[in-house]
Image (tube, rainbow, N blue to C red):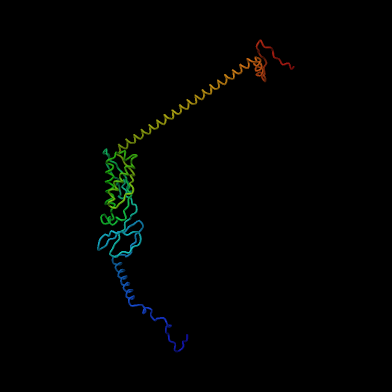
Amino acid sequence: MVMEDGWDPKPPKGVPENPLKDIPEVFSKIFRSIAIVFVILIVFSVMFGSLFVSVGAGEVGVKFNQFGGVQEDELGEGLHIVPPWVSVTKYSVQSETYTMSGRAAEGQIVGDDQIQALTQEGLTLGMDITVRYRLMSDEASNIHQQLGMNYAEKIIRPTIKSAIREVVSSKKALQVYGEERQLVAGEMQENMEDSLKSDGIIVEEVLLRNVVLPTRVAEAIESKLQADQDAQRMVFVKQKEELEAERKIIEANGHANATVARARGEAEALSIINKEIAKNPKLIDYKYIEMLQGQEIQTMIVPSDQGLILNTGN
C-alpha cells in the first residue's frame, strides 16, 4: 500500500485519545479501593476458608465466630456470604430415625442392642424400637453449643431407654405384648416428647417393633392361644350342628305338611267320587270298562249280579 506524503495519523475529531483521562479522580480512587478490598477478601478466604457457604435442602447452618463463639442466628437453605473468620456447621432438620434392635447391623449400634425392661410383674422383656425425630431449626445453635454433632448418642439414646423402662414398669407383660402395644408406644412417645422438647428435638413417632417374652411366659401364652382357638372351633362345630338339626326339622316338617296336604287332597277326591257314584251307580261300571280297554284279557271274572259284556260286532 502506497501512502501519500504528508499523511498525519491523528484520531478523528471528537474522540479522546485516552477515555480514562475523562473519568474524575474520585471515581478512580473508589475503583482502586474496591479492588484492594476484593484482593484482601480473596487472601483471607484462601487463608481462613471460603467466603461462600451453601446450605442444602433440609439443613440449617450454625455459625461459629472465631472472635465471639456460636451465633444464635442460623443460616437457612441457599447460598450465603460469610466472613472468613466465621465457620459454618450444617445440621439436618429432616426426619431422622434412631433404632435399637437385637438384630446385628439393624440399628445405630452394631450387634445386639435390644432394650431390656422389667414389667409390673417383674418379668424381663426384650424390645426392638425405632424412634423418628427431627431438630427444631431455630434450636440448632443451642444443640451445637451444648451437645455437638453427636447429639443422638448423647441425649436421644439415653432418653429412649429411660422412657421405655419407665412406661414398661407400670404395665403387665400381656399389655406390652398384646393388643395394647400401640397404646404403650403412644405413652412412650409422650414421655420422650416431654424430655426432648427442651433440648430442641421433636419426637414424631415411636415404633415398638418387636417384643420378646421370657420362654416360660411365651409358652403359657401360646398354650392359652391354642386353647382359645380350640374353644372357638368347638363353638363353630356346635353352631354348625345346630343349624343342620334345624335344617332337618324344617325338611321333616315340609315332608309332613306335604303328606297331610296330599292325604287331604285324596280324601276330598274320594268324597267327590262317592258323591257322584251315589248319584249314578252305573258310573262304576263305566270306569271298570274304561280300565279294561286296551288290555289283552282271555278270562274275565265279573260279579254274579252283572250281565256278560260281549263284543257283538262279530
Residue 13 is left or right of residue 211, and the answer is right
> Residue 86, how many percent across, how many down?
28, 63
Q: Quadrant of residue 235?
A: top left
Looking at the image, which residue sits at the far right?
A: 314
- Where is 119 relative to 94, above or below? above
Q: Nearer the viewer, residue 277 or 293?
A: 277
State which quarter of the image contains the C terminus.
top right
- Where is 183 relative to 78, above or below? above
> Residue 39, how many percent across, how many down?
31, 71
Looking at the image, which residue sits at the far bottom?
A: 5
> Residue 151, how many percent across, how many down?
28, 53
> Residue 310, how many percent across, how many down?
71, 15
Looking at the image, which residue sits at the far top?
A: 304
Residue 156 is left or right of residue 309, and the answer is left
Q: Quadrant of residue 142?
A: bottom left
Q: Quadrant of residue 215?
A: top left
- Where is 205 relative to 65, above or below? above
Residue 22 is left or right of residue 123, and the answer is right
Circle count: 0
